[in-house]
Image (tube, grey):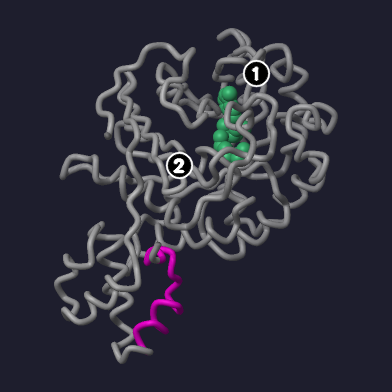
Amino acid sequence: MKPNIKDLRTDELTKFLLERKHPAYRAKQIYQWLFQKRATSFSEMSNLSRALREELERYFSISRPRVLRRAESRDRTVKFLYGFADDVSVESVLIPERHRLTLCISTQAGCGLGCAFCATARLGLKRNLSASEIVDQVLEASRSLLPEERITHIVLMGMGEPLANYDHTLRALEIMTDGDWGVGISPRRVTLSTVGLVPQIEKLMAETHVNLAVSLHAATDELRNELMPVNRKYSLTQLIECCRRLPVPRRKRITFEYVLLRGVNDSEADARALVKLLKGIPCKVNVIPFNPHPGSSFQRPSDVDITRFQMVLHHAGVQINVRRPRGDDIQAACGQLNGEVGGPDARPARVLATAS
Ligand code: SAH
């Protein structure tokens, strides 16, 4: 199997070119073909010499994931199931809204963090995705769009913990956000969500300009330990201190996610504890009413309870947004991704296309 050229770093590709007496700027042209024009063969790369195209062909392959399934929700959310060479599969979710088109991508097949309420956690960690496998989700989803449509926002909120696959995620972010040779989506329109791996958050904030979302889900260590085993490693105090330490322009953009679980973390006292915990941090809170999935015993709170929780934060001056479930009829909402479109127990979905 020839190495996938999309996984070559710029210095590696440049070295390959220089060793064969090609100018270094060819690397940029090759990346533009791969990431901007979404080339699937070297023969398309018409501004390269035939000799170079043949050499590239001899040494490298160009990856292209298989679209195993594509399902569209009644709210127009689309879920893709992509298969990679070793039969590992992951999901991406395309979410159309009035003025934006957001793609939610995965960074790992499965996940090893074990959050109690998450469907992906049940799979365990299968493996990290490579940088190209992360970026290929964007390239493939883009191919499915109408000519006038364009992905405007990327969220790393699909399967897996992006910061547990730090190096590949960072390279994928570089490819997705570079305007010169990469996909060209501004880092201000990219949001990475993490369970709260403190050292990696600090590194990410120093090395990129993407937005940070932190999955909080509880305002006390006792409850967070139960819901998110990672809390035993990085406690709430460490996590919140890390967020406070971030330079102000970065801190302003922190989003805290809070999955609302009936009878577990949805009381007025929980809301007040959350207000207290976040005091002084310029941030916004994204409340995600629990999205049920087969085999989970957690429940979504009633609308009255959701509103009550929301009001406590609102009256305390915290910017809060309650996330509507998108694509929940096709198990595409937050925390429902399990590497299968539908699942044996899912409600019937309209499956638009199935690749052979
Ligand atoms: N591993 C990262 C990326 C996943 S993002 C992280 O944990 O942040 C997906 C978001 O959905 C996270 O905030 C996650 O905790 C939340 N989530 C997981 N399962 C959910 C469910 N069943 N209902 C609602 N939100 C859920």
The span from disc 2 to disc 1 (Cα, nearest Å) is 43 Å
What is the x, y in percent for residue 343? 46, 20
In which quadrant will I find the N terminus? bottom left
Marked residue nearer the N-terminal end (2 or 1) = 2
- Ligand 1 image-quadrant field: top right
Can the viewer see residue 255?
Answer: no
The residue where tag 2 is placed is 87
- Which of discs 2 and 1 lies nearer the camera? The answer is 2
Q: In this view, does 3 lie above or below 319?
A: below
Start-end of magenta stretch: 3-18
Q: In this view, does 140 lie to the left or right of 174?
A: left
Residue type at numbered disc 1: Phe
Identify the secondary structure beneath mark 2: loop
Residue nearest the observer in this picture, 277 or 179 = 179
Residue drawn at (62%, 39%) of the image: 111
What is the x, y in percent for residue 173? 47, 58
Crowding at mark 1 (Cα within 10 Å: few <14, some 14-19, many 20+)? many
Residue type at numbered disc 2: Asp
Report if the CB atoms under discs 2 and 1 are less than 8 Å apart: no
The dot on residue 309 is 1
Which secondary structure is most common in the magenta stretch? helix
Residue drawn at (56%, 9%) of the image: 303
Q: In this view, does 185 lie to the left or right of 117?
A: left
